[in-house]
Image: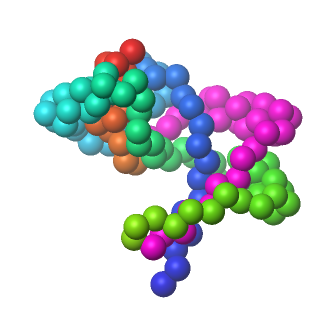
Amino acid sequence: TTFVRRGFMARVRLEPFGEGKIYPHEQTMSGPKEDRLKLYRATGFNLSPVFGLYPDGDGEVFALLEPLVRTAPPLVAKDHLGVTNRLWVVTDPATITKVIGLMGPKPVYIADGHHRYETGVKYL
């Protein structure tokens, strides 16, 4: 069976839960957050992305990105589980500006990465 997960990477302003537009759906534990904070301090990096979901019933965001995906070759990598990942780099300033405009007012619900997100907030 082939599954396709489509998304895009973007940065967000880190904000404590309840103070902005980023929402959790689960509680976190202090132990994993302390481990991640040690890793952040040792490396100066977040080494794993946070996955978020956002409402876009009309598909406006991907309607902007789709033409770029269809015309440019992706970077391709296969991981140790055999999952093929394809990444397209978007450099068109007009498209980036439009995506930012669409995403700005939308809430983001963390699907995976609650500990990483909360640790990022603390790391600031």
Quarter the C terminus occupies: top left
Residue 98 visible, this angle: no
Task: Specify whether residue 114 is in view.
Answer: yes
Q: Furthest residue to the front?
A: 42
Examine the image and state in which quarter residue 82 appears.
bottom left
Reply yes or no: does residue 103 show up in magenta: yes
71 in magenta? no
Front position in the image: 2 or 73: 73
Q: Position of residue 99 (x, y in %)?
A: 73, 38
Query: x%, y% of residue 55?
Result: 57, 46
Front residue (pair 16, 70)? 70
Total labels drawn:
0
Identify the residue at image location x=77%, y=61%: 73
| Residue that lies at the very extreme toward the bottom in this rendered image | 1
Please tell me which residue is depicted at 84% across the width and 39% down the height of the picture.
92
- Please state which of residues 89 and 93 is positioned toward the viewer in this rendering: 89
- Quadrant of the rendered structure where residue 95 is? top right
Residue at image x 59%, y 37%?
10
39 w.r.t. 90: above or below: above
Q: Left or right? Give the position of 22 relative to 26.
A: right
Residue sticking out furthest to the top? 124
In the image, residue 19 sits, relative to residue 51, either above or below, namely above
Q: Position of residue 14 (x, y in %)?
A: 46, 23
Give percent across and percent down for residue 45: 42, 29
- The residue nearer to you, when weighing 60 against 12, is 12
Residue numbers of the magenta segment:
82-109
The residue at 54%/44% (across/down) is 54
